Amino acid sequence: MTTKQSELQARAQKRHQALRRKHRDPRFRNVLGRFLEEGLLETKVEGITPRRQAVPLDDALWAGTVEPRIMELLPAVLVKKPNLLRMPKVLPDDVAEVMHAIRHGKPAPSFRGVAPEQYLPWVSEVGRKGRAPSALKSFRFRQEDSRRLARLRESLPARSDTEVVRMALEWLEASTK
Amino acid sequence: MLGQAALWASGVDLALTATQDLDAYADYEWAVQQELERLLAAKGKVLDPHGHEVWMPRETRYDSLYEGRFVEASVADADAVLISKALRAPKKNQALVTEYLAKGASERFFALARKYGVDLEQFV
């Protein structure tokens, strides 16, 4: 090992000690244990045991600064599995903003250093798999459109007007490829 | 097998934490992919659809993980995986690379870091 490599190792050891202290922090252990119990993460961090009790959101946000994979999962957990967390009465602005964006299909912001392309894929994997939250959209239909929707709902058959529109959109997209 | 899953499979002595997605370079028929996805799903895991975009050094060694009649699987070596992580996602993998340096990184790791211009100072 060269002198430079030894010096790097010594400095890395100091930094690693600081990280190990954070790994021993109850906030980190509880959050990781909760995510472990839910099957969202696997870990080889020593002594982490699965935990069923919800963890405070603040603790999860702090633990996410220690382990970025926690932060990457948090937006999806907030929307699809909020019962993993104990929410404060007032949500931090960025938390409320990311939840709103996911729920309403709005352009997603970066979340505490995690880009949307990193956290959005988890939205369909956390909780009920393959399900992303649906977004409310309103349209102004003429009476004839509404009657057509009702007729199609009966004849297809479809469970709802939304399902008719969804089927029509899929068909339209497939036919225009 | 690449990424965090490769580190996990190689048994490297690091305090790993991994999400449930699997990064992989794959050359397989659709039916094999379907079966892989089914097996992963049974373990609560998913195949990362962007796994094939992961950059790996040309020097990566792939050790055999499974050799079947129709299917072979191999795992990327830990040094190459860590170089990939250090170069492409240093912030996300800071703790991992720091720990590896602290525990005594291999000569090969240092050589790959030099070759690919990985600034190891950012991890200490």
Image (tube, coloured by chain):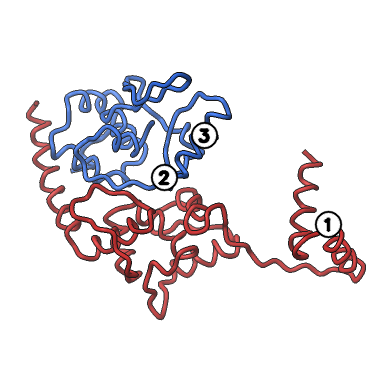
Residue B108 location in percent, x, y? Answer: 21, 23
User: What residue is disc 2 on?
Assistant: B43
Q: Are marks 2 and 1 on the same chain?
A: no
Position of residue A155 in the picture relative to residue B69 (left or right):
right
Q: Residues within 10 Å of mark 1 (few under 14, many from 20)?
A: few
Q: Residues within 10 Å of mark 3 (few under 14, many from 20)?
A: few
Position of residue B56 in the picture relative to residue B119 (left or right):
right
- Residue A156 is labelled as 1
User: What residue is disc 3 on?
Assistant: B35
Position of residue A152 in the picture relative to residue A54 (left or right):
right
Residue B18 location in percent, x, y? Answer: 33, 46
Q: What kind of residue is marked 2? A: Lys
**Chain assigned blue:** B
Q: Secondary structure at mark 2?
A: loop
> Who's the residue at 35% across and 38% down the image?
B5
**Chain assigned red:** A
Say whether disc 3 or disc 2 marks the residue closer to the N-terminus.
Answer: 3
The quadrant holding residue A58 is bottom left
A80 and A1: which is toward the camera: A80
A110 and A66: which is toward the camera: A66
Q: Quadrant of the N terminus of chain B?
A: top left
Chain identifier of the residue bearing label 2 in the image: B
Q: Are marks 3 and 2 on the same chain?
A: yes
The residue most toward the bottom is: A89
Residue A162 location in percent, x, y? Answer: 74, 63
Chain identifier of the residue bearing label 1 in the image: A
Q: What kind of residue is marked 1? A: Leu
The residue most toward the front is: B69
Check the image and report above or below for B115 versus B44: above
> Who's the residue at 52% across and 25% down the image?
B28
Check the image and report above or below for A78 versus B29: below
Q: What kind of residue is marked 3? A: Glu
